[in-house]
Amino acid sequence: MLKQTQSKFDSNWLNAEKADKYLRRLHSLMKSQKPYLDSRLTLTDLATMIDLPPQYLSQLFNEYIKENYFDYITKWRIEEAERLLKRGDKDMNIDDVGREAGFNSPASFNSAFIKFRGMGPGEFREKSGK
């Protein structure tokens, strides 16, 4: 069962049952439609996709997922980049991988990859043998 923490939000609307429902909806959307691949995706866009007001999606991130929107989306993008890097497509350079995974620029891709994986995407590709 999910545990709610002290909040600056109106906690009357969000109980564990509702949070579970929206978390399942969010996870299903992320897996099936991959909205994180759109580099222009916003919290408001994502909230609309799961039929939830943006402020409540923000509350869901803060109180139940325990990370902010940006880190949540970045982790999905990094996982997508890892899949692409492991595929070993020689025609796809590192910058192409970052764009395909939803990053705006090579710099943001590299810094996010290092932040979440402790190494750059080029090093990851080499270590995965592709």
Image (tube, grey):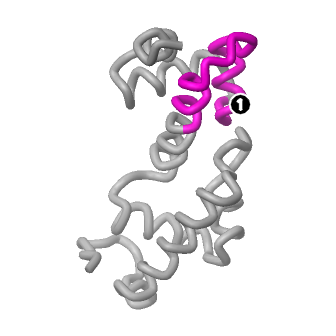
**Would you say the magenta stretch is mainly helix, strand or loop?**
helix
Is residue 130 highlighted in magenta?
Answer: no
When the figure is inspected, residue 6 is found, relative to residue 11, above or below; the finding is above
Left or right: residue 34 versus residue 69 is right
In the rendered image, which quarter contains the N terminus? Answer: bottom left
Residue designated by label 1? 100
Which structural element holds mark 1? Answer: helix
In the foreground, 109 or 31: 31
Residue 129 placed where, x, y %?
47, 13
Residue at point 73%, 43% (across, down): 38
Q: What stretch is highlighted in magenta?
A: 80-103
Question: At 37% across and 61% down in the image, what residue appears?
Answer: 65
User: Residue 85 appears in which quarter of the rendering?
Assistant: top right
Q: Which residue is drawn at 60% across and 57% down?
A: 30
Classed neighbour count for the residue bearing mark 1: other residues with Cα under 10 Å, few (<14), some (14–19), many (≥20): some
Type of amino acid at the residue the image marks with label 1: Glu
The C terminus lies in which quarter of the figure?
top right
Q: Tell me where residue 36 appears, x and y as whole percent.
A: 64, 47
Front one among 85 and 35: 85
Image position of 39 (left or right of 83): right
Was residue 98 drawn as part of the magenta stretch in this picture?
A: yes
Numbered-mark total: 1
Which residue: 71% across, 27% down? 99
Q: Is residue 52 left or right of residue 76?
A: right
69 vs 7: above or below: above
Determine which quarter of the picture holds residue 90. Answer: top right
109 or 6: nearer the eye? 109
Q: Where is residue 12 in the image (x, y as percent from the top left)?
A: 39, 90
- Where residue 103 sits: x, y (%)? 65, 30
